[in-house]
């Protein structure tokens, strides 16, 4: 993301538009399973498009072959955590370089439903062998999001929202409690925004929209 030079007071008005998004703007929505990052990514895309922005919505695991393999591995408890970590990093590498970076270069707002912070939080929770530093190292060639928003939810509520019995390997309360704690620690350390998902969807979305709009306004 590059900031456009201020071209006079008229541009400083409350009006924001695509003009400011030179070099793109990269938003990552994060959170524990069932927090609603997919729902909110879609709603945010619609909101920003309605405001006149060019928006590219994507997600991780991505649609690459590695992403498809990862979706399969989410059902398999026999996969070592280190293998998961390396594959998530490889998926992100191809996702960033072949898709996200390109869209940012075309001045899109890119919204990713999960990104690097998911690997930091989930894979370091998955195994004591995995440190945050190592995750950062294996992900070192990808760009960072300009804005990361953590959608926070009590795992008990999140799991109760699931209406099928087909749980993936991370979808149990004891694991997701740790994931939640680490997301909140990371938010404090890294200055990420936290939005509580314990409210009706429209209110939660409104809070997310306000954060994004404020950030975009500051680019102008
Ligand atoms: P997702 O389908 O987004 O789950 P949900 O919609 O329930 O939030 O994500 C798939 C799972 O993959 C989720 O449990 C988090 C996990 N994950 C990691 O462990 N590491 C990662 O780097 C990413 C991107 C996801």
Image (cartoon, rainbow, N blue to C red):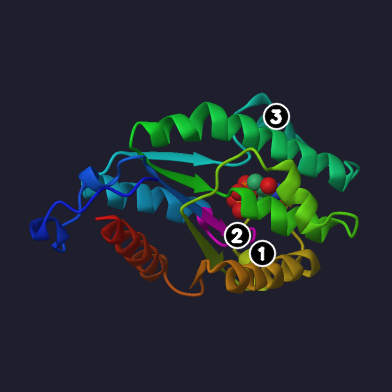
Q: Looking at the image, which is closer to me, 122 or 35?
A: 122
How far across and down, in percent of the image, does residue 76 sit? Answer: 84, 42
Q: Is residue 61 above or below residue 214?
A: above
* Label 2 beta carbon less than 8 Å to ligand 1: yes
Mark positioned earlier in the residue sequence (2 or 3):
2
Q: Residue 47: x, y in percent?
A: 29, 52
Which residue is identified by label 3? 66
| Picture quarter with the C terminus | bottom left
Asked if marks 2 and 1 touch (Cβ < 8 Å), the reply is yes
Q: Which residue position is annotated with label 2?
A: 34
Q: Which residues are magenta?
A: 29-37
CA distance for labels 2 and 3: 23 Å
Q: Quadrant of residue 210?
A: bottom left
Split into 4 quadrants, where in the image is the N terminus? top left
Left or right: 9 in relation to 39:
left
Chain-order first, disc 2 or disc 1: 2
Q: Residues within 10 Å of mark 2 (few under 14, many from 20)?
A: many
């Amino acid at each position: 993301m590059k900031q456009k030079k201020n071209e006079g007071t008229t541009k400083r008005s409350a009006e924001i538009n695509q003009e400011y998004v030179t070099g793109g703007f990269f938003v990552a929505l994060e959170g524990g399973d069932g927090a609603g990052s997919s729902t909110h990514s879609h709603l945010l895309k619609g909101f920003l498009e309605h405001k006149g922005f060019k928006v590219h919505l994507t997600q991780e695991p991505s649609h690459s072959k590695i992403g498809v393999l990862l979706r399969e591995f989410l059902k398999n408890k026999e996969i070592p955590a280190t293998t998961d970590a390396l594959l998530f990093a490889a998926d992100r590498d191809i996702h960033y370089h072949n898709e996200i970076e390109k869209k940012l270069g075309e001045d899109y707002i890119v919204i990713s439903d999960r990104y690097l912070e998911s690997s930091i939080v989930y894979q370091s929770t998955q195994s004591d062998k995995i440190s945050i530093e190592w995750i950062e190292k294996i992900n070192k060639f990808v760009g960072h999001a300009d804005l990361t928003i953590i959608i926070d939810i009590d795992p008990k509520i999140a799991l109760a929202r699931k209406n099928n019995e087909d749980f993936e390997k991370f979808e149990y309360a004891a694991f997701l409690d740790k994931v939640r704690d680490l997301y909140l620690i990371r938010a404090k350390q890294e200055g990420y925004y936290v939005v509580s998902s314990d409210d009706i969807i429209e209110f939660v979305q409104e809070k997310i929209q306000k954060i994004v709009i404020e950030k975009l306004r500051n680019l102008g």
